Amino acid sequence: MNGGGRKDPPGAADASLVSLQDLRSKLQEFARVRDWDQFHSPRNLLLALVGEVGELSEIFQWKGEVQRGLPDWNEAEKEHLGEELSDVLLYLVRLADVCGVDLGQAALSKLKKNAVKYPVEKCKSQSTNAQ
Ligand SMILES: Nc1ccn([C@H]2C[C@H](O)[C@@H](COP(=O)(O)OP(=O)(O)OP(=O)(O)O)O2)c(=O)n1
C-alpha cells in the first residue's frame, strides 16, 4: 500500500519506503543479470545521467514558467516527468555506487554543511537567496 491508500501490485516494493540502498541493490542486480556491469563505468554513467537530465529539461522546454504542483499538466505529462526524474535518480544512485560513494551519508553531510553556510537567522525572509 502507499500513502494514498492504493494497493501496490503483488510483489511490488512499498514505494513510500524505498531507500537509496534498495535502489542501489536493484540497479546492481539489473546490471548483473544483463552482463551490463562492464558498461557501467563512472564515465559512461555520468554521460547517461547528463543525457537523462537533457530529456528531463526537454519536458519543460518552451513551456514558460510552470506552477508548483503542475496544475495545468495532464496525467500523461506527469507520468513522463516521473519517468525522466527516475532515470536521473537511478543513474545518480548507480554512479555513486560504482564510485564507492555512500550517497545517503554524503547527502546528509552536505545538508549539514548547507545549514552552516546558510544560517536561518541570516537567510529567513530575505527576498533573494543570493549570498
Ligand atoms: N546501459 C543501461 C541502459 C539503461 N539503463 C536503465 C537506467 C535508466 O533508468 C533507463 C534508461 O533507459 P533508456 O536509455 O532506454 O532511456 P529512456 O528510458 O529515457 O528511453 P528513451 O531515451 O527512448 O526515452 O534504463 C541502465 O541502467 N543501463
Image (tube, grey):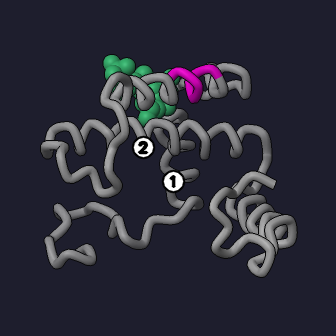
Three-letter amino acid code at disc 1?
Leu
Main secondary structure of the magenta stretch: helix
| Most foreground residue, 9 or 70 | 70
Q: Which mark is residue 86?
A: 2
Q: Is residue 127 above or below residue 74?
A: below
Q: Is mark 1 within 8 Å of ligand 1?
A: no
Q: What residue do we see at 78% from left, 81% from top?
A: 121
Q: Is mark 2 within 8 Å of ligand 1?
A: yes
**Residues shaded magenta:** 47-51
Query: Quick check: 118 left or right of 25?
Result: right
**Which quadrant of the structure image shows residue 36?**
top right
Q: Is residue 131 above or below residue 64?
A: below
Q: How many marks?
A: 2
Three-letter amino acid code at disc 2?
Ser
**Which quadrant of the structure image shows residue 1?**
bottom left
Query: Quick check: 19 left or right of 10?
Result: right
Residue 41, horizontal then vertical, whole percent: 70, 25
Instruction: Check disc 2: other Cα within 10 Å, few if <14, some if 14-19, many if 20+.
Output: some
Q: Where's the C terminus, which quadrant?
A: bottom right
Task: Give the residue at mark 1.
Answer: 23
Q: Is residue 23 above or below residue 41?
A: below
Q: What residue do we see at 74% from left, 66% from top?
A: 111
Q: Which mark is residue 13?
A: none
Ligand 1 falls in quadrant: top left
In the structure shown, which secondary structural element does the residue marked by tag 1 occupy? Answer: helix
Residue 50, horizontal then vertical, whole percent: 58, 25
* Label located before the other in sequence (2 or 1): 1
Q: CA distance from mark 2 to mark 1?
A: 11 Å
Residue 7, horizontal then vertical, whole percent: 15, 71
Instruction: Please indicate, yes or no, whether residue 34 appears anywhere in the rendered image.
Output: no
